[in-house]
Image (cartoon, coloured by chain):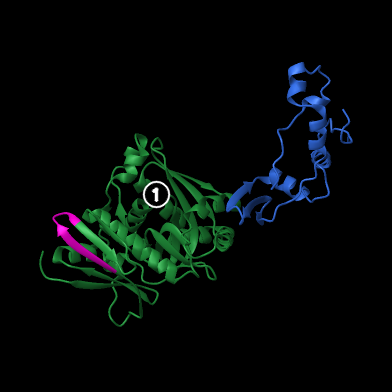
Chain colours: A green, B blue
Amino acid sequence: MSGGPHRLSIAFNGRYVEVQCDSDVLAVKAKERLRHLLASPRQRSERILQVALSELAASWIELRDSTGRVACGSLEYVFHLARKWITAAFVSAHPDFLWLHAAAATRDHHGILLAGPAGAGKSTLVVQLIEHAWRLLADDAVPLEMDNRTALPLPFSPDVRTALHALDNDPHAFLEQPKIVVAVSPDQVALSPASIDVAVLPQYVSSRAGIPALERLSVVRAVQCLAPQCVFPLQDRSRALRDVFRLAQSVPCYRLLYGDAVQAAAELTRRWSPESRDLRRSHQA
Amino acid sequence: MRRFGKRRTRERSSVNPSKAEDEAAPAVERSIERAAIPSRAAVEAFEDEGECLLYNPARDQASALNRTATEVWHLCDASLTILDISEILGKRYELIDVPEHRSPGST
């Protein structure tokens, strides 16, 4: 343990969360995960939460916040929890947005939304999309402005599970396995909002080798799938449902059945990258 | 939303019903069911392309209805009986053997 305390400001849409780390090691790890959300003093306006990380012993970290919550655990566990707390603070501070448990990537201001329950492969797919020249817009939680159907950037560094095949044997054990943070360079991160062109609900199917399948969902079916992914601690559910319904009416929604994330990302790019859309348009013309 | 009993088809069957089946579904109960007038509960309905999503804020429950169920839902207008609804749907889809209306208590 040395140095500190280090203070980092994590900003979203004019609000910020202060993260204090009592050691250099913790500060490095925090920056690794939060680097794309770090704010300069100029960007900060209203502090909505304070989070403190303290190294009690080797691999034993204490997490506290300004609301009185305390938790202890491994580095991975407390960072996972800290990210949840930070996200929840932003959600509470912006109840006017529709917040979805999802990931999003963008190319030339056209966005693709990947929504689904834990273990669906949202982060894994978004990382693969980045390999196909998409930019990271958000991971874990996506804030959507419903008036113009745009997603705002909230680019936490994606963390992924490595063993998808473990789903076959024990889904619970799969969800329990620690995640690995994927480093995304700043030029692979979107800094401005993007209009969402398509919503994809990925579903990992171990037996599906080769080309993934995309199935268009009816609006009601899409709402059924998207509604459980709403994050709305302060927002009433009726409003969230109305917003999800509007989203499903205005954006085509697809179920993606895939067994290989690399192929799935290639297929999504083939279908929805701005270039392929332009190409289709020119063919139609 | 009201819940209705299991669908009973034996009452107008030409096949001799067994005693056990008669005991399981008394004629009077069957007639009451058929004469019941279903009405819609206070729910929010979201409709698109013939399908519907209902949300009951009081119970915090959502139900998705397919096209057929949505048609039934529309017919639950607090004036039509279950028998009326089945007759309307039977005629709409040109199904044969549409049951005749029976008054409550008749067998």
The residue under the point 79% across, 32% down is B29
Is residue A241 shown above or below B10?
below
Residue A85 x/y as whole percent = 35, 63
Residue A124 x/y as whole percent = 34, 51
User: For numbered disc 1, what is the local secondary structure?
Assistant: loop
Q: Was residue A58 drawn as part of the magenta stretch in this picture?
A: yes
Q: Was residue B8 drawn as part of the magenta stretch in this picture?
A: no
Residue wearing tag 1:
A118
Which of the 4 image quarters holds residue A5?
Answer: bottom left
Out of A254 and A265, give the one closest to the viewer: A254
Q: Chain of mark 1?
A: A
Out of A269 and A282, give the one closest to the viewer: A269
Whether residue A182 is visible to the viewer of this picture, yes or no, is no
Is residue B54 shown above or below B6?
below
Range covered by the magenta-colored residues: A51-60
Which of the 4 image quarters holds residue A36?
Answer: bottom left
Q: Main secondary structure of the magenta part?
A: strand
The residue under the point 18% across, 55% down is A60
Q: Is residue B107 left or right of residue A116?
A: right
Count of numbered marks: 1
